[in-house]
Image (cartoon, rainbow, N blue to C red):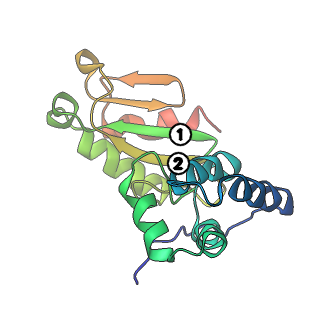
Amino acid sequence: MGLKQSTIPFAGTSEQHEKLLKVIAEHKGDKGALMPILQQAQEIYGYLPIEVQTVISNELDIPLEKVYGVVTFYSQFSLNPKGKYKISVCLGTACYVKGAGDILDKLKETLKISDGECTEDRKFSLESCRCIGACGLAPVITINEDVYGKITADDVEDILAKYN
């Protein structure tokens, strides 16, 4: 089936599993139950790994492919955990023409992860976005609530060092 899976081992707790089963039980039989269950499952786990999707599939008796299809279709859902520090690289037009692609490449190389992934220690996660509305500061990245503008790929390592 070619499901994309996180490279980080799943580490769900029995408490999280019980919460998930309770959520599923509350919605089981409701028309359109999958979306609210997925939303609450992501709140419980922080993301929707294949292990969680499989529980939902089995409990609702719907094919895993359908669950996975919904998870991958909607951008609000994540297959990968988010890091303590969420790095977002703006790839909107203004940022892109001023070198945001090089910044994203440097982050991928430095952190050894791809767009949408999280480092093994769960310290950093990386994602690109379309526009954060700070075009005058292009190119821009954010790390959690911190905004870094007018940066270059050469600034990446110094910026990351602030989060050690």
Q: What is the quadrant of residue 135 in the picture?
A: top left
Q: Are marks 2 and 1 in contact (CB under 8 Å)?
A: yes
Look at the numbered disc 1 and give the secondary structure of its residue. Answer: strand
Q: Earlier in the sequence, mark 2 or mark 1?
A: 1
Look at the numbered disc 2 and give the secondary structure of its residue. Answer: strand
Residue at 26% over, 45% down: 102
Question: Which residue does the numbered mark 2 point to in the structure image?
Answer: 125
Q: In the image, residue 87 lies at what x, y percent?
A: 47, 39
Outermost residue toward the right? 15
Report whether 145 appears left or right of 41. Answer: left
The local crowd at label 2, few if under 14, some if 14 to 19, many if 20 or more residues have their Cα within 10 Å, is many
Residue at 39% over, 51% down: 74
Question: Which residue does the numbered mark 1 point to in the structure image?
Answer: 86
Residue at 61% over, 69% down: 60
**Label 2, label 1: how far apart the Cα atoms are:** 5 Å
When the figure is inspected, residue 99 is found, relative to residue 4, above or below; the finding is above
Determine which of the numbered discs, if any, sits on residue 103 in the image. Answer: none
Point out the image quarter for the N terminus: bottom left
Q: Amino acid at mark 1?
A: Lys
Q: Nearer the viewer, residue 109 or 53?
A: 53
Q: In the image, residue 34 lies at what x, y percent?
A: 53, 57
Point out the image quarter for the C terminus: top right
Q: In the image, residue 128 lies at what x, y percent?
A: 35, 44
Q: In the image, residue 153 lies at what x, y percent?
A: 32, 40
Q: Nearer the viewer, residue 42 or 129?
A: 42
Q: What is the quadrant of residue 25 in the picture?
A: bottom right
Q: Amino acid at mark 2?
A: Ser
Q: Nearer the viewer, residue 70 or 82?
A: 70
